[in-house]
Amino acid sequence: MSILDEMKAFIIRRRLLANMIPSDCSHPLEEWMAIKARMAFKQNKELKEHIGKKVLNEVTREDFDEYQIFRVREQMRYAEKNSPYYRNKFKDAMVRPEDINTWDDLEKIPFTEPADLAENSMYFFAVSRTKLRVEFTTTGTTGHRKTIGYTTNDIVSKIDIVASALKNIGMKDRDTLHIMFPLVTAWDPSLIMAGACRILGYGFSICSEMDVEKQYEMIKNSKTTYIIGLPSFIYRITFLMRENKNLKQLGIKKIISTSEPLSESMRNNLEDAWGCKVIDVWGMTEFGLACAVECDEQDGMHTDEANMLFEIIDPNTGKHVPDGHTGELVITSLNAECTVLIRYRTHDMVSMIAPPCKCGMHFNRKLSKPSGRMDLQFKIGMGHKVYPALFDECMFADRSVIDYRIKITKEQYKDVLTLEIETNKPSDELKTKIIDAVSHIMEIEQGIKEDLIDAPRVEFVDVGATKYAAKMSKIVDLRKNFDN
Ligand SMILES: [Zn+2]
């Protein structure tokens, strides 16, 4: 039996919660979280006492806060018992699960750094390796390789959130999902997506081909209504396909972008090409594919608060910052069985948006779009921080640009940005347009004024000249002996 068949049999026995969401529900994702909270409430005396209600029908934000703090205590108890890393960490910090009763109490728990996970992956494991269904090592963009393990229950909860997210995005019976990820060496996201479709009874097709004709034929023949995948991959294929095909005729209802940042110009160009909305889904290798999901409002991402607790902290003081303020995102897993992560620093800068949302969700908190990972930032000029997301808007504003890379070098005292533009329509006009747009990015403009950054340069490369690689670093720092 394949992993998928085995999962399917297991899930049917266990009943996926995503299948319990009423079909007429207007906001399935939040309903799925409420189902989880109500189930825990029914089964647990400790939670009942904290919430102070006899029954839990309508779940309020306050109720959900209590539910999450309760899950943190449970996850800590589990980690203290089973994960050697956390057993020691809690002991050293002299913190016990019982000490955590309010949101403020979370600050008593020490942070976990990605470097800790990279160096001690096996000490995080809370189950023996023989019980693992999947074990993989991340490729990552920052050099730290982390090993993550999933038990069957871990995989089921990841399929469950993806299934709920697909429902929330609008998928229904008779819809078909076309899954587009380039071939990757680590754990293949297509398996989770396909698993979710099987359980929900939706059709699906998987295609990792760079070949435009093959992608087009498969989308058409499998009667695709939704597309999900890596945005840089979808963007590339879309760009090449639209040259001689009318993509709007395919009748795609929505495109779902995941696992990589989606810039607004990329989104606009994709929406224009396919004639449908593009929905952004944010995930992290450490926590899964759908940690946060946009609704039709396209204004912030609804967080998976049933599997994760999201905190925003000031990266310098480590203290919580209020909703609406930008800070570093810190995540705690609430029901992980193998790789438990408690107060894990993501190094992503975001802010939280308080409920309600216009889509109808009333207690779920939304995440603003991550603005750039702190560990992917480069300092140029007088210490101005630049990161890939900063450049996406001006690069993809012109539809003929399919991808780009930025090389940073140093000439005498000045930083030089060379923009390598992949296009099949190079022109002086395009060159001027890009240089002009990049020169007006606040951080660059300032550096040019201070005479520490030279005017940006453009180099054109043919489409396909640079081999496409998923998660390829967009900025390459070639400065030597420079204190970054
Ligand atoms: Zn919403």
Image (spheres, rainbow, N blue to C red):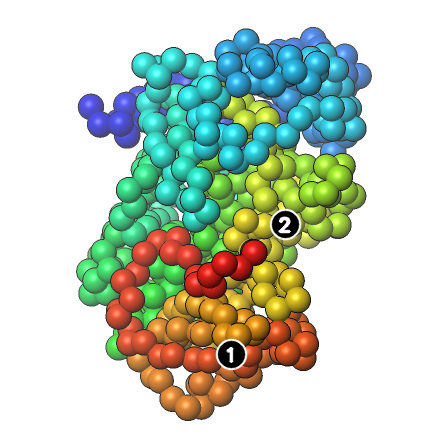
Residues under labels 1 and 2: Cα distance? Answer: 26 Å
Residue 439 visible in the displayed image: yes
- The CB of the residue at mark 1 lies under 8 Å from ligand 1: no
Specify whether 327 is left or right of 197: right
Mark 2 sits on what residue? 349
Residue 354 visible in the displayed image: no
For residue 65, the mark is none
Mark 1 sits on what residue? 456
Q: Residue at x 77, y 42 (%)?
A: 321
Q: Residue at x 64, y 12 (%)?
A: 91
**Classed neighbour count for the residue bearing mark 1: other residues with Cα under 10 Å, few (<14), some (14–19), many (≥20):** many
**Classed neighbour count for the residue bearing mark 2: other residues with Cα under 10 Å, few (<14), some (14–19), many (≥20):** many
Foreground residue among 384 and 75: 384
Q: Residue at x 47, y 35 (%)?
A: 286
Q: Residue at x 73, y 19 (%)?
A: 100
- The image quadrant that residue 298 belongs to is bottom right
- Expressed as whole percent of the image width and height from the top left, the position of residue 444 reads 61, 73
Specify whether 264 is left or right of 155: right
- The image quadrant that residue 382 belongs to is bottom right
